[in-house]
């Protein structure tokens, strides 16, 4: 139920500041007509000034108590974005980023203007510089600030370091996973034009693997398109584009939306005195790209709005009355209020543990309390979650596995939470062992992706080692699914190794476990599984393929699979869902494929109606 963590925790960050715009410089691979690969270069003492025009707005609808409310944020910045080369350390280039001469400056959060005049702009931006650590292929490893830099400056830079990233690889198209202030997105690049002067790219985000700030559940609609020009000398010339992300509720209406529009155009090149280390090195706060910082005062105001009058007394009165039912009146609004209150007053988390241990509380009530703690997600809430799951009331329950599964809902696990998951994995059997397998994969994978924690990596590797040692298909399937929950690219080869297993159950688990991993090798493995003779395996492979962009070659392979009778009739629904998004971009291939399906003995009228609707027949 991670409702608050995803809906508000993310909304606070996405709305708190910008939702958008910059990063795109470093680059690498690609063969030019002169066989010289592109790489971004930032010589020490050189500077580059760009004209930036950036707008973004986000809105999340909050329903409750018969009224409609929303969290909203808007930003519009026009001015200069300046990059300064501070030299390299090994293979990592250090690049300063400044925002100067802002002729337009508006940033509203919850209706309050945070940049009302020139003096407020100077207080946030004047003389401040972030330090980017960049690989030559454009990947930003970290963004560093002075500890005392305003959170507004930090979040502006972090947002910009999401939108303007450009990654250059060899080939006509390539896909990478990139951080933004809204989460992590799979981004597809394609080379449009190239000559001796440079290259023009089309950049399009095709899916958010992790989406923050726009609620949970329902359908996510994404429209994204950016153009980027890169000079052969290793300098970004231009970025221009926009993106809209919408989450639709069960009734089809938009429950949350974010829109970003950015233009960055290169101007003057200059020099500066670079005999001193960049200021950010002195007192350093080093953040991973996309990580936002919450100003305590702003966060407090947002929590007040989220809590919406809920008090500790009312919270526990409601839980006493409704916990054993498992749901409360206006349940989603209650979850929003309760998780906000638990963050606002962390001491209440321990009181939830006391309530959890009451003999009168039934399993539905205990599950609800665990949902509240997992959804709150603060270190105090996670500590209480672990304490509750360690209690004899939890471990002695026949449905302990179901309770234990709540660990998988924690989106930002602490090291202690991962340690508990690993300890439980090592000490349980039966259903709890299965649940702890999935929980360990989810928590360790999340911690590793967010912090590159060696401890989390060791936990993920343990799952992989146990998979290699296992001979039982059922256990192999569970371990594969746990590695899929982890979503760690480094384990893709291990997972793909089971795509040819004798057991259909294991092959299906391999297909599902690759859903978060978008490497070319993983995609080709899924393509082979899409031709599996077992219907469930094929369906799962197609569902996982649907979570990544498909190029013309892959669509032609899927077309040939259909024309050769390789698609099970029972899988036509999922197959049509897989190819339908490409009807406009690849009409010949997709129309041929869909037309062929109509010639088959399809008794499902819904499938037939859907295909005819797509073909306009």
Image (tube, rainbow, N blue to C red):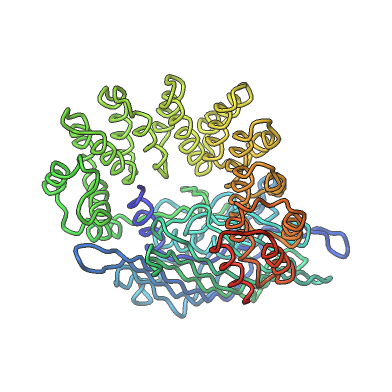
- Report the residue at 61% width, 61% height from top: 576
Q: Can residue 18 be seen in this view?
A: yes
Q: Determine the residue located farthest toward the bottom in the rendered image.
A: 103
- Would you identify the image quadrant in which residue 500 lies? top right
Judging depth in this view, the residue of 247 and 601 nearest the camera is: 601
Question: x%, y% of residue 604?
Answer: 56, 59
Relative to the observer, which residue lies in front, 605 or 367?
Answer: 605
Q: Which residue is drawn at 65% across and 39% down?
A: 492
Q: Where is residue 456 in the image (x, y as percent from the top left)?
A: 51, 33
Q: Percent from the top left, x then y, of residue 599? A: 70, 64
| Picture quadrant of residue 607 | bottom right
Which of the pair 28/341 is nearer the observer? 341
Quick check: 407 left or right of 289?
left
The residue drawn where x is 14% and y is 43% is 316
Q: In this view, does 113 lie above or below 157?
A: below
Where is 553 relative to 527, above or below?
Answer: below
């Amino acid at each position: 139920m991670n409702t608050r963590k995803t809906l508000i925790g993310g909304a606070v960050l996405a709305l708190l500041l910008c939702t958008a715009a910059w990063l795109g410089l470093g680059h690498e691979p690609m063969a030019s007509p002169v066989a010289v690969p592109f790489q971004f270069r930032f010589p020490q003492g050189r500077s580059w000034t760009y004209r930036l025009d950036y707008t973004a707005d986000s809105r999340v609808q909050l329903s409750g108590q018969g009224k409609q409310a929303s969290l909203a944020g808007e930003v519009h910045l026009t001015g200069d974005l300046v990059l300064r080369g501070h030299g390299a350390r090994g293979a990592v280039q250090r690049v300063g980023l400044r925002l100067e001469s802002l002729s337009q400056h508006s940033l509203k959060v919850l209706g309050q203007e945070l940049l009302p005049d020139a003096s407020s702009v100077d207080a946030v931006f004047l003389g401040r510089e972030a330090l980017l650590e960049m690989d030559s292929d454009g990947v930003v490893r970290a963004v560093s600030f002075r500890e005392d830099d305003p959170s507004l400056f930090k979040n502006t830079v972090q947002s910009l370091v999401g939108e303007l990233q450009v990654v250059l690889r060899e080939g006509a198209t390539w896909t990478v996973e990139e951080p933004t202030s809204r989460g992590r997105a799979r981004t597809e690049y394609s080379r449009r034009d190239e000559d001796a002067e440079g290259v023009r790219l089309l950049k399009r985000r095709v899916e958010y693997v992790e989406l923050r700030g726009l609620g949970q559940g329902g359908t996510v609609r994404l429209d994204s398109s950016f153009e980027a020009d890169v000079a052969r000398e290793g300098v970004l010339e231009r970025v221009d584009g926009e993106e809209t992300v919408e989450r639709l509720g069960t009734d089809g209406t938009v429950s949350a939306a974010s829109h970003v529009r950015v233009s960055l155009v290169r101007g003057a090149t200059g020099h500066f005195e670079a005999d001193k280390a960049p200021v950010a090195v002195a007192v350093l706060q080093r953040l991973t790209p996309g990580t936002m910082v919450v100003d305590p005062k702003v966060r407090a105001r947002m929590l007040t709005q989220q809590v919406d009058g809920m008090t500790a007394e009312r919270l526990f009165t409601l839980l006493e009355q409704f916990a054993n039912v498992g749901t409360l009146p206006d349940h989603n609004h209650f979850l929003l209020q309760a998780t906000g209150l638990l963050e606002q007053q962390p001491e209440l988390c321990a009181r939830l543990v006391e309530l959890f241990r009451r003999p009168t509380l039934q399993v539905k009530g205990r599950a609800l309390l665990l949902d509240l703690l997992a959804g709150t997600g603060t270190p105090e809430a996670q500590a209480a979650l672990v304490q509750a799951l360690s209690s004899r009331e939890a471990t002695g329950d026949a449905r302990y596995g179901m309770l234990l599964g709540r660990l998988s809902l924690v989106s930002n696990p602490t090291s202690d939470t991962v340690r508990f998951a690993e300890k439980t994995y090592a000490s349980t059997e039966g259903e709890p062992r299965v649940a702890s397998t999935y929980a360990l994969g989810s928590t360790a994978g999340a911690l590793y992706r967010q912090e590159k924690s060696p401890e989390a990596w060791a936990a993920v590797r343990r799952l992989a080692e146990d998979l290699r040692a296992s001979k039982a298909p059922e256990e192999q399937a569970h371990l594969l699914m746990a590695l899929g929950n982890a979503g760690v690219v480094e384990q893709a080869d291990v997972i793909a190794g089971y795509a040819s297993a004798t057991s259909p159950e294991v092959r299906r688990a391999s297909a599902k476990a690759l859903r978060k991993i978008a490497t070319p090798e993983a995609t080709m493995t899924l393509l082979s599984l899409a031709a599996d003779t077992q219907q469930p395996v094929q369906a799962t492979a197609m569902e996982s393929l649907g979570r990544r962009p498909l190029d013309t070659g892959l669509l032609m392979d899927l077309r040939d699979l259909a024309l050769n009778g390789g698609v099970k009739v029972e899988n036509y629904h999922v197959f049509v869902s897989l190819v339908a998004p490409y009807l406009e971009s690849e009409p010949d291939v997709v129309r041929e494929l869909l037309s062929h399906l109509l010639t088959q003995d399809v008794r499902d009228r819904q499938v037939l109606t859907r295909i005819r609707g797509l073909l306009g027949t």
